[in-house]
Amino acid sequence: MQVSPSLLSADFANLTPDLEMINESECDLLHLDVMDGVFVPNISFGFPVMKAVAKICKKPLDVHLMIVEPQNWISQVRDLGAEYMVFHQEACTHIHRTVQAIHAAGMKAGVSLCPATPVSTLEDIITDLDQVLLMSVNPGFGGQPFIEGTVEKVRRLRNLIERTGSKALINVDGGVNASTGSLLAEAGADILVAGSYVFGAENPYEAIHSLKIL
Ligand code: DX5
Ligand code: ZN
């Protein structure tokens, strides 16, 4: 399993030790949650903070944009050196155009679905995607309980990917811990995002390891 800890639950007044933990840990990616107070009812951090984080972080960045008009920010995300630029299906009218532009900028493209948005909305774009990020909580906050129906949603997405020959990886975000993570692994998830489970743990290396082995 690939593991993508979410910086949203780190200590914003002292990020360096948390980033050093990320660098030394077994995790595969660092998940960065950008919120605009419009698409979601919260504001997190923006490009000045992410630039500072990118200087220290040695893991590839998994940038999750919970913002309207994500197509306007492609060059700024590219300038961070991000591996994935992930935006919401619900926040973007021209998904195909945006995916092409992300690829032209040299990044991998991901589309995220809120809990009520069906997997079937991705039928006509799935073969162009590198990642689908299924939200297993309503986006906007860390520490919320896992929405159980996501497990079946992962199965439906796995079927769509297999049926179409897509190379997209299935990433799941929200309420992930070792027990929800094992259900998601069994259903076919490739990447797990975990915020409070990792940064709230007494031993974050062990929390990452417990997901890594799923
Ligand atoms: C929520 C964010 C998540 C969040 C997950 O909108 O997209 O990445 O950090 O937090 P946990 O793992 O605590 O549910
Ligand atoms: Zn996220």
Image (cartoon, helix red, strand yellow):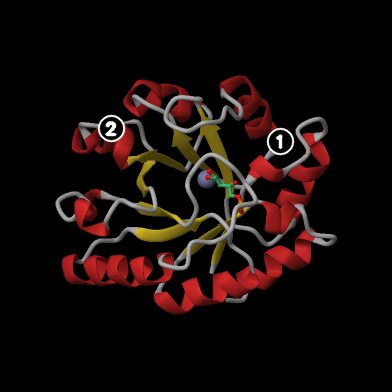
Pointer 1 residue: 56
- Estimate the spatial distance between the alpha carbons at disc 1 and disc 2, rounded to whole Å: 31 Å
Q: Secondary structure at mark 2?
A: loop
Image x and y of residue 67, in percent: 43, 29
Image x and y of residue 155, in percent: 33, 72
Crowding at label 2, few (<14), some or many (≥20) Cα neighbours within 10 Å?
some
Residue type at mark 1: give it.
Ile
Crowding at label 1, few (<14), some or many (≥20) Cα neighbours within 10 Å?
some
Q: Residue at x 62, y 69 (%)?
A: 211
View extreme (left): residue: 124
Residue type at mark 2: give it.
Cys
**In front of the other: 166 or 181:** 181
Closer to the eye: label 1 or 2? 2
Q: Is residue 13 above or below residue 178?
A: above
Residue 101 in the figure: left or right of residue 187: left
**In front of the other: 200 or 47:** 200
Q: Is residue 118 above or below residue 85?
A: below
**In front of the other: 89 or 26:** 89
Q: Residue at x 35, y 21 (%)?
A: 72
Residue 66 in the figure: left or right of residue 105: right
For the C terminus, which image quadrant?
bottom right
The image's mark for residue 153 is none
Q: Secondary structure at mark 1?
A: helix
Image x and y of residue 126, in percent: 23, 54
Looking at marks 1 and 2 on the same chain, the residue that comes earlier in the sequence is marked by 1
Q: Is residue 3 above or below residue 75?
A: below
Pointer 2 residue: 92
**In front of the other: 183 or 105:** 183
Labels in figure, total: 2
